[in-house]
Image: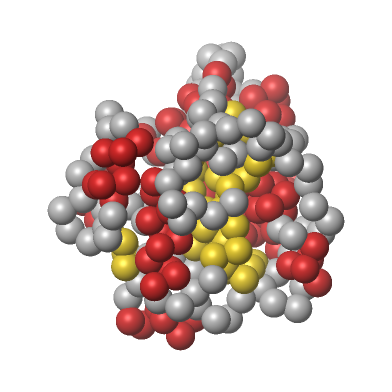
Amino acid sequence: MPNAAVRVLDTALDLLVPARCVGCDLPHTQLCPGCRALLEQAEPVGARPAAAPPGLPEVYAATPYAGPVRQILLAHKERGALRLARPLGTALAAAVRCALPGRAANRLRPLLLVPMPSARATVRARGHDPTLRLTLAAASALRRADVPARVLPALRQRPGVADQSGLGAADRQRNLHGALRVPRHRLHHLDQGLIVLVDDLVTTGATLAEGARALGEAGADVLVAAVVAATAKHGPGDRAQPQPG
């Protein structure tokens, strides 16, 4: 659906179903122009955690995980505000483009966006897979910008992984070690493009490092990682400028 048509539909829905902005609580809209601009005009930066776990690829984030952006991500993820996937996906696409080195901008090979998986029970409880939805929106935004991209859900979570919330960096690494795998039927897809790991948020980097480990053991080479937002736990000198393409 074209951008203008989506905006018209969003406006109509806001009029028919009174709402307040999920980011700043402004009335009569689910996402006000100011909060939308935080996502759609984001300026991505390098976002490597200060105590990065081994194996973590280079990470780029569209925006800090704070203020309205934090509320928008939570509304999409935990409260099923599905219309937020498009602006969040636009921000994620910007982070992907910032992460691309010059050699990836030749359009000769597509980008394969690999979303970090959620447990099946979590997806059932939420009624949707928020990271997969964001990744699909990001791939669409990239294609609109003439960057060939598609989604490759190549990772699966093994049973027995504890909830990460409340765990420190070391406990997250222990909890996640060996938690992900690549199913056999996905193996032949891994060499069909340039792999970019994507997620909604980076905190300690343990989740992305485990994703990179599982893909590496399956024979894939992870180019970079991109996220919508990053917590303020980064090392010095991590700011980055957008790359060509």
The image quadrant where one finds the C terminus is bottom right
* Image: 19 above or below 77: above
Q: Is residue 52 visible?
A: yes
Percent of width and height locating residue 152: 49, 69
- Quadrant (top left/top right/bottom left/bottom right) for the N terminus: bottom right
Answer above or below: position of 59 versus 146.
above
Give the residue at the far bottom of this rendering.
Answer: 188
- Of 21 and 158, nearer the camera is 158
Q: Nearer the viewer, residue 199 or 132?
A: 199
Looking at the image, which is closer to me, 147 or 60? 60
Residue at x-position 39% and y-position 49%: 207
- Image coords of residue 242 (percent x, y): 78, 46
Q: Is residue 237 left or right of residue 195?
A: right
Q: Residue at x 58, y 47 (%)?
A: 59
State the image coordinates of residue 33 (x, y, percent, origin top left): 70, 25
Q: Is residue 5 visible?
A: no
